């Protein structure tokens, strides 16, 4: 598949949009909880707030934190692929698999939080990223 190099920024930007959507969702859950619970300032420390928050409030926050872990490798790799002119159809498909399964992971984590399902969604997304990393590493050496 012949692709233009810039097309790799579509999944890159989609990942950023996912992060923004989870950020908005987190605050849509967090602010009503804080105001409705009439929490005192001493209850708003990170540790105490985490202890008091129900899963419907803490899960979106945890998911947002997740979006600043493995996805940082994704962002760096996308820039590397673009700069080195190595974007091709395989990388593009793997990038969309990563983003799609990260989006599904976020939906599950922020809502029903079925841990086994969440794990497999995470595993597929991360496997696609490791495929990309491995392929880029092999290509950089050869």
Image: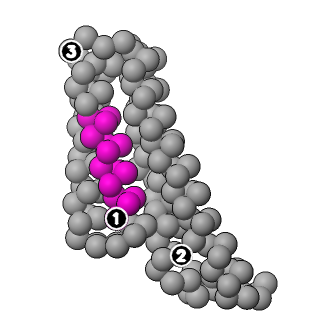
Asked if one can make out residue 133 in the rendered structure from this viewpoint, the answer is: no
**Residue 106 image point, x, y percent:** 39, 58
Task: Decide: is 100 above or below 13.
Answer: below
Where residue 99 appears, as percent x and y from the top left, is 35, 43
Quadrant (top left/top right/bottom left/bottom right) for the C terminus: top left
Identify whether 104 is placed above or below 1.
below
Task: List the residue tagged with mark 1.
Answer: 108
Classify mark 2: residues with Cα within 10 Å, few (<14), some (14-19) or many (20+): many
Residue at 57%, 57% in the rendered image: 23
Question: Would you say the magenta stretch is mainly helix, strand or loop?
Answer: helix
Crowd tier of the residue under label 3, counting other residues whose Cα lies within 10 Å: few below 14, some 14–19, many 20 or above: few
41 or 25, nearer to the observer: 25
Q: Is residue 20 left or right of residue 36?
A: left
Q: Position of residue 92 (x, y in %)?
A: 30, 27
Residue range (magenta): 94-108
Residue 84 appears at what percent x and percent y? 40, 15
Q: Which mark is residue 57?
A: 2
Q: Quadrant of residue 48?
A: bottom right
Name the one closer to the observer, 17 or 63: 17
Q: Residue at x 28, y 72 (%)?
A: 115
Q: Which mark is residue 1?
A: 3
């Amino acid at each position: 598949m012949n692709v233009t190099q810039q097309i790799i920024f579509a999944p890159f930007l989609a990942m950023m949009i996912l992060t923004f959507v989870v950020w908005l969702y987190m605050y849509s859950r967090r602010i009503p909880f804080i105001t409705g619970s009439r929490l005192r300032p001493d209850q708003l420390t990170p540790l105490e707030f985490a202890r008091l928050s129900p899963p419907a409030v803490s899960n979106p926050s945890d998911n947002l934190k997740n979006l600043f872990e493995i996805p940082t490798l994704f962002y760096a790799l996308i820039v590397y692929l673009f700069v080195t002119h190595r974007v091709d159809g395989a990388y593009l498909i793997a990038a969309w698999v990563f983003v799609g399964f990260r989006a599904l992971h976020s939906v599950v984590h922020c809502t029903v939080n079925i841990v086994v399902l969440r794990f497999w969604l995470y595993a597929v997304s991360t496997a696609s990223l490791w495929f990309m990393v491995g392929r880029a590493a092999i290509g950089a050496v050869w």
